[in-house]
Image: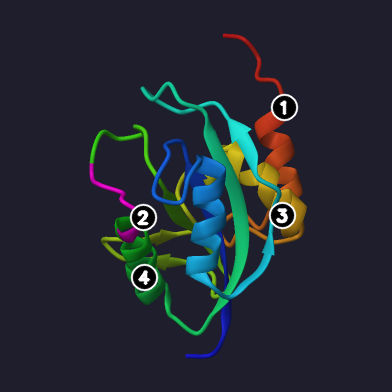
Amino acid sequence: MPITSYVIALGSNRRGRHGSPREELRAALGAIGGVRAVSRLRETPPLGPSRRRFANAVALVDSAEGPDALLRRLKAIERAFGRRRGQRWGARVIDLDIVLWSGGCWHTRELTIPHPHYRTRRFVLGPMAEIVPGWRDPLSGRSTLPLLHAVDRPRPRA
């Protein structure tokens, strides 16, 4: 397979064998390899029941792997870092999600690209705006910056 690019979202809100959540993200970037660009690391409030703040970042990664092969490798990295299945949106040592792929859309039982929720998540779109501001969503055709501005736009009260 030719080299393609992926946008990978990284998150951590629990210490692991590499140290703090920020150190877990840095170690994960090294484990992923092929990193062409990475956003600055940010702390964000959790979604759902977790009380711990997250360290988040986004990386632009080049790989000869297809989406399913990359997903398997990312899941193996998560397991090696100590991630275990648990409560949805709970505390985790590392979370690695494929958000976008230069090949466009992809859908299997295990993986959907683009990530179904990334358009509503500032903690993904903000870092993306730093490294891939012009990347277009393959479904809407909108680039990262307008998607980010749409998340930030105040909503009318019902």
In this view, the mark in front (2 or 4): 2
Picture disc at residue 153: 1
Residue corresponding to mark 2: 81
Choose the circle earlier in sequence order: 2 or 4: 4
User: Is residue 83 magenta-colored?
Assistant: yes
The residue sitting at the bottom extreme is: 1
* Above-or-below relation of 2 to 124: below
Picture disc at residue 73: 4
Q: Which secondary structure is most common in the magenta stretch?
A: loop
Across and down, in percent, residue 107 comes to: 37, 65
Disc 2 residue crowd, few under 14, some 14–19, many 20+, Cα 10 Å = many
Q: What residue type is labelled 2?
A: Phe
Q: Which residue is drawn at 36% across and 55% down?
A: 81
Disc 1 residue crowd, few under 14, some 14–19, many 20+, Cα 10 Å = few
Give, as a single range, the part of the protein colored magenta: 80-85
Residue corresponding to mark 3: 143
